[in-house]
Image (cartoon, rainbow, N blue to C red):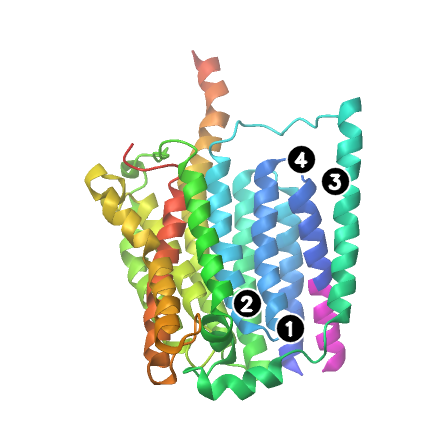
Amino acid sequence: MPLPLAVMLLLSCAGVGLWRIWRGPSGADRMLGAEQLSTLAIAILLLLGAFLDQPALGDVALLFALLAAVAIATFVTRTWTRLHEAQRRPEEAEGD
Amino acid sequence: MSAFVIGFDLLLGAGLLWLAWQALFHPQPFAAVVHFMAFGLMMALAWVRLEALDIALAEAAIGAGVTGALLLAALGRLPDGPTPRRLLRAWQRPPVALALGSVLLLSLWLVWVAWQLPRPGLAAEVTAALPESGVRHPVTAVLLNLRALDTLLEVAVMLGAVWLVWSLGPELRPYAPVTALPGLPALTRLLHPLFLMVPAYLLWRGSHAPGGAFPAGAVLGAGGILLLLADGVPWMQRPEHQPLLRLLLAAGLVLFLGLALGGLLLTGTFFAIPLAIAGLAILAVEVAIALSIALMLMACYLFGEPGR
């Protein structure tokens, strides 16, 4: 059966994403790991929806897709700019 | 097929436990927040597997999306670097041990009570009462008619949360000027129509299928957060619009309370909605609650009282 195999493949990809979230090392790495997990969850939900014959799972996938954009926008504007500045500051001090 | 499903569930459960542990005990706060966001994603998958699609929708919207964004933004206000682990002083140990012991006892008691609950629950009673509720989806019937008092109190709790956040101080201005991120306003303009369309769809679906006011409000609020990030809603911060903002924040709760008191006047019972107007009344309250929830999430996201 190809569908369970595909879900298992996606789950192993999710394992890689989890490892990246845990290991880092930079904030962007972790955030992209979480976004990869979100994308994989969408794919798993769509496959499960077809497999279990529950089309409503597509709605959950839709919400995942929309909210991933909000998470990444928040990260870039409110967290990453700050982390980036914190990393750049010592170099600027050396340059002076 | 069953082996595949069991394996999937086992992997999901193991992943959830691991993510929860990391979210609680990772030394770096940022990593802990990202683990928490991943936990929300996996938790929504777990709710899907438990066939609780309404909770999965709410978890996907609130747990994985909006709470993650709130925590990320809160992180921007914390000092950098890992938090130092403080050891407990001698006099602090007995109260901490007492608190932990009582939490343990309470959770054991909760497990015992949950074990004692009648099985298979109240599904048959809800199905029997469904024709008198005005909607065709059992979860919406329970949330907005049969046990509407719980939902009313939940909305009141959210309003209380906004009150608490606003009491912390003036609002947080964004760190990055929008001009430095030209992609952000463009992304917002592209995506925001979707953030308006999907809640309308969820609200419409709520009367006969999984959906309803809470996920709709959360998605609408997430769209609002995107607008806030791109500085797209300046009226929220203007002093002259503050009375309107407060009125809109309270509108869902007030309309819901009005419905309850109207039921008291018409039928003599608090929250008894006459069947003739039940469908329409529930739809009106759902729209008002969804709008209020969206505004409450945006208001929490300001991290302080605007216009001060």
- Do the residues bearing badges 3 and 1 touch, measured as CB atoms within 8 Å? no
The chain ID associated with circle 4 is: B
Q: Which residue is mark 2?
A: B55
Q: Which residue is mark 4?
A: B27
- Pointer 1: residues within 10 angstroms few (<14), some, or many (20+)? few
Element class at badge 2: helix
Write down the quadrant of residue B107 in the picture: bottom right
Element class at badge 3: helix
The chain ID associated with circle 3 is: B
Q: Is residue A87 magenta?
A: no
State the residue at coordinates (40%, 65%): B216
Kind of residue at disc 3: Ala
- Alpha carbons under labels 3 and 1: distance apart: 32 Å
- Alpha carbons under labels 3 and 2: distance apart: 30 Å
Q: Earlier in the sequence, mark 3 or mark 1?
A: 1
The chain ID associated with circle 2 is: B
- Do the residues bearing badges 2 and 1 touch, measured as CB atoms within 8 Å? yes
State the residue at coordinates (59%, 54%): B38
Segment tinted magenta in the rendering:
B1-12
- Alpha carbons under labels 3 and 4: distance apart: 23 Å
- Pointer 2: residues within 10 angstroms few (<14), some, or many (20+)? many
Kind of residue at disc 1: Leu
Q: Which mark is residue B99?
A: 3
Q: Are marks 3 and 1 on the same chain?
A: yes
Element class at badge 4: loop
Residue A63 coordinates in the image, percent (x, y)? 45, 64
- Alpha carbons under labels 2 and 1: distance apart: 10 Å
Q: Is residue B11 magenta?
A: yes
Kind of residue at disc 2: Ile
Q: Are marks 1 and 4 on the same chain?
A: yes
